[in-house]
Image (cartoon, grey):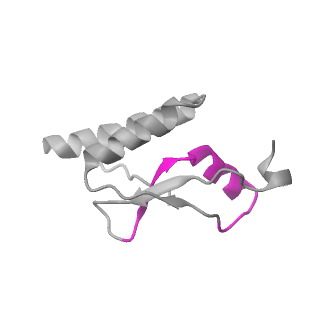
Amino acid sequence: MSIKENGLLHFPSATRNLDKPGKWLGISGNTRIAACKLLGIQEIQLIVEEYSSEDEIKAAIIAGNESTKVTEYQRAMIYKYTKQIWERKQGTRTDLMQLQDE
């Protein structure tokens, strides 16, 4: 199936970024979001999930990506997000990577 031909049939999910008010963190559907960007789709519907801790967010990212085939890019993004959460939890920040592309 194609997003171009059929539209977005399964909406991505996101949660509020606990560290950056007003910003969002993708939980699942990052590839669908990237495909929509490539197609020039400016707005999409999201499933908004509420989490109160970084541990809950980390678990949701892992769970949301375990049930499907995960590309190497997606695997790298999961690693990036969980590594950042882990480093903040430990009180050590060694980089300035951002959680969102834009």
Residue 25 highlighted magenta (yes or no): yes
Nearer the observer, 28 or 96: 28
Q: Quadrant of residue 92?
A: top left
Nearer the observer, 73 or 9: 9
- Residue 25 location, x and y as percent? 43, 55
User: Which quadrant, please, contains the N terminus?
Assistant: top right
User: Is 16 rendered above or below residue 3?
Assistant: below
Q: Taking the image as drawn, is residue 15 in sight?
A: yes
The residue positioned farthest toward the right in the image shown = 5
| Number of numbered discs overlaid on the protein picture | 0
Q: Seen in the image, is 54 located left or right of residue 33? A: left
- Residue 99 location, x and y as percent? 40, 52
User: Is 38 rendered above or below residue 23?
Assistant: above
Residue at image point 76% right, 57% down:
39
Nearer the observer, 38 or 89: 89
- Residue 85 location, x and y as percent? 28, 44
Q: Seen in the image, is 36 located left or right of residue 101? A: right
Residue at image point 30% right, 46% down:
56
Residue 62 highlighted magenta (yes or no): no
Nearer the observer, 79 or 45: 45
Q: Seen in the image, is 15 located left or right of residue 43? A: left
Residue range in magenta is 22-43
Q: Taking the image as drawn, is residue 93 in sight?
A: no
Residue at image point 25% right, 52% down:
53
User: Is 41 rendered above or below residue 66?
Assistant: below
- Residue 20 location, x and y as percent? 32, 64
